[in-house]
Image (cartoon, coloured by chain):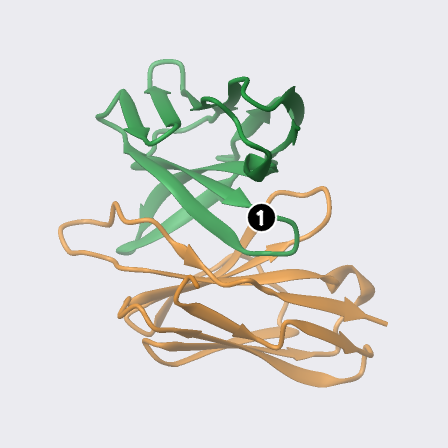
Chain colours: A orange, B green
Amino acid sequence: ETGVTQTPRHLVMGMTNKKSLKCEQHLGHNAMYWYKQSAKKPLELMFVYNFKEQTENNSVPSRFSPECPNSSHLFLHLHTLQPEDSALYLCASSQVTGGGGSNQPQHFGDGTRLSIL
Amino acid sequence: SQQGEEDPQALSIQEGENATMNCSYKTSINNLQWYRQNSGRGLVHLILIRSNEREKHSGRLRVTLDTSKKSSSLLITASRAADTASYFCATAYIIQGAQKLVFGQGTRLTINP
């Protein structure tokens, strides 16, 4: 149990569907992250939220829309996805301290395995 | 690119032997972290080493960092079958107060009983 819960664990959707991935952290952290893990590619950072403010959008297509309503919850809204978007989507959280940054590790959920038909 | 590279991509050893994985990166870092991932699961943090540290230990794990060569290594001593997993190094950069991790491709470690 990592303290970061992702739902659903598996999701199959058509290209015209709209769905959302959910992430919840129970660690009291103030930063949350979305990553994409595709086969044979390094883990790619998609979005960063620091104190609920989005501070990084790593050139992610607009068909992925993040939402962070509070420091414990993070969503990834999906619409009109493409087959190449099939991947494992991982959420992580960490505690960001003041003074120019953080030397704290990130805690990951078990991911949502997304398959686009 | 800030992306790190790991070496080897795959490693298969006998139980009880030591396993060494290497990571190289290209730009200055805040810290470097090693993670482990079992098949179908999320990443689990193993060790974080700061840029001003040279070596760190945690149980059977030993991590070294050489900032002049921009490289790090992870040593697992007395390996066990349960150590079978993928291992990733991640270089950490601070952007607008948040920590950005850039991951390598990973090393797939197999421990044979």
Q: Is residue A58 above or below residue A15?
A: above
| Relative image position of residue A5 (x, y in whole percent) | 48, 72
Q: Quadrant of the C terminus of chain B?
A: top right
| Residue A88 location, quadrant | bottom right
Task: Specify the farthest residue to the top.
Answer: B69
| Relative image position of residue B48 (x, y in whole percent) | 32, 38
Q: Is residue A114 left or right of residue B22?
A: right
Q: Is residue B94 above or below residue B8?
A: below
Could you tell me if residue A95 is visible in this image? Answer: yes
Q: Residues within 10 Å of mark 1 (few under 14, many from 20)?
A: many
Task: Specify the farthest residue to the left.
Answer: A99
Q: Residue at x 67, y 43 (%)?
A: A41
Q: Is residue B76 left or right of residue A84?
A: left
Instruction: Determine the secondary structure under disc 1.
Output: loop
Q: Residue at x 42, y 61 (%)?
A: A2
Q: Is residue B73 left or right of residue A46?
A: left
Q: Is residue A40 left or right of residue A52?
A: right
Which residue occupies the foreground of this view, A78 or B34?
Answer: B34
- Residue position marked by numbered label 1 in the rendering: A43
| Relative image position of residue A22 (x, y in whole percent) | 53, 78
**Amino acid type at mark 1:** Leu
| Relative image position of residue A52 (x, y in whole percent) | 33, 74
Which residue occupies the foreground of this view, A61 or A71?
Answer: A71
Q: Is residue A93 above or below residue B103?
A: below
Count of marks placed on residues: 1
Which residue occupies the foreground of this view, B69 or A22?
Answer: A22
Could you tell me if residue B86 is visible in this image? Answer: no
Q: Which chain is mark 1 on?
A: A
